[in-house]
Image (tube, rainbow, N blue to C red):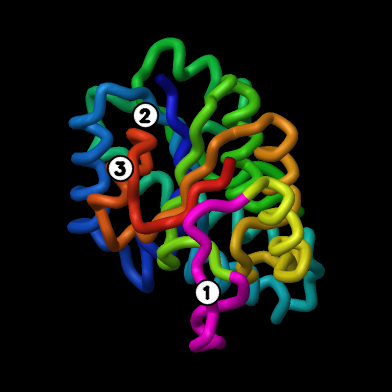
Amino acid sequence: MIIILSVGGSMVNPGKPDQAYISSLSQIFKNSPHSFGIVVGGGKLAREYAEGERKKGKGEFWADLAAIRATKENAGLFLSHLRGICCLNICDDFIQAHDALQKHRIVLMGGTIPGITTDADAALLAECIGAKRLVNVSNVDGIYDKNPAAHKDAKKFGTLSFEKLVSLAQVQDTRHAGGHFIFDMLACKLIARSKIESHFVSGKNLEDVKNAIEGTRHNGTVVR
């Protein structure tokens, strides 16, 4: 089975590369019987790169391009930990990743084109290869009715319909590089149209990450 992961950049590079965490997450992939398409986000690095372009007076297209560069740098952090079972090139597009998965158990991607988040990239990759399960690994332990960082009364969903997820994303999707939202609207619509079972878990809880990969019970949110 091929599992798609969307890994938040803040998990692997919160300010500097967290090699211990990357090693632990990589060990999960090594020990699993599955194949993986792993899309890595930009996190803080992407926000810094994007803001650097804005300070130069450049628009959002150029901010997005800079953020994409950050995602590929973050994806590259996994290469030394997955040597021998991973394609050694960071794939630039979905067809390249699709073809690489015919030869390798694990492929890595960052962002692809301006205006598209790495969450949407992960959803598109899942569609491209026909994956039936997607796991979103971030610094939030599931999907809430509102931003839990700003609202103490935010409530976490154990399960969600695709339709409800789309409605939540509609409110929070800013379309700015490095913006904060649950799972952007395009990504939500993509997983909804292809009925891709999606799991949202905290990357800090590696047991939840393992369970989400296997499709078993965890403390996050399941969308189906």
Question: Tag 1 or tag 2, which sits nearer the N-term?
Answer: 2
Residues at discs 2 and 1 in contact (Cβ within 8 Å): no
The CA span between labels 1 and 3 is: 22 Å
Residue identified by numbered label 2? 88
Asked if one can make out residue 101 in the rendered structure from this viewpoint, the answer is yes
The CA span between labels 3 and 2 is: 27 Å
Q: Residue 99 location, x and y as percent?
A: 53, 15
Other residues around mark 3 within 10 Å, as few (<14) / some (14–19) / many (≥20): some
The answer to whether residue 173 is left or right of residue 148 is: right
Question: Tag 2 or tag 3, which sits nearer the N-term?
Answer: 2
Residue identified by numbered label 1? 155
What amino acid type is highlighted by mark number 1? Lys
Front in this rendered view, residue 142 or 80: 142
Residues at discs 1 and 3 in contact (Cβ within 8 Å): no
Asked if residue 159 is among those painted magenta in the image, a careful observer would answer yes
What amino acid type is highlighted by mark number 2? Leu
The answer to whether residue 100 is left or right of residue 118 is: left
Secondary structure under tag 1 reads loop
Residue identified by numbered label 3? 211
Q: Residue 184 location, x and y as percent?
A: 68, 57
Magenta segment boundaries in residue numbering: 145-160
In which image quadrant can residue 60 be found?
A: bottom right
Question: Tag 3 or tag 1, which sits nearer the N-term?
Answer: 1
What amino acid type is highlighted by mark number 3? Asn
Q: Residue at x 41, y 57 (%)?
A: 220
**In front: label 3 or label 2:** 3
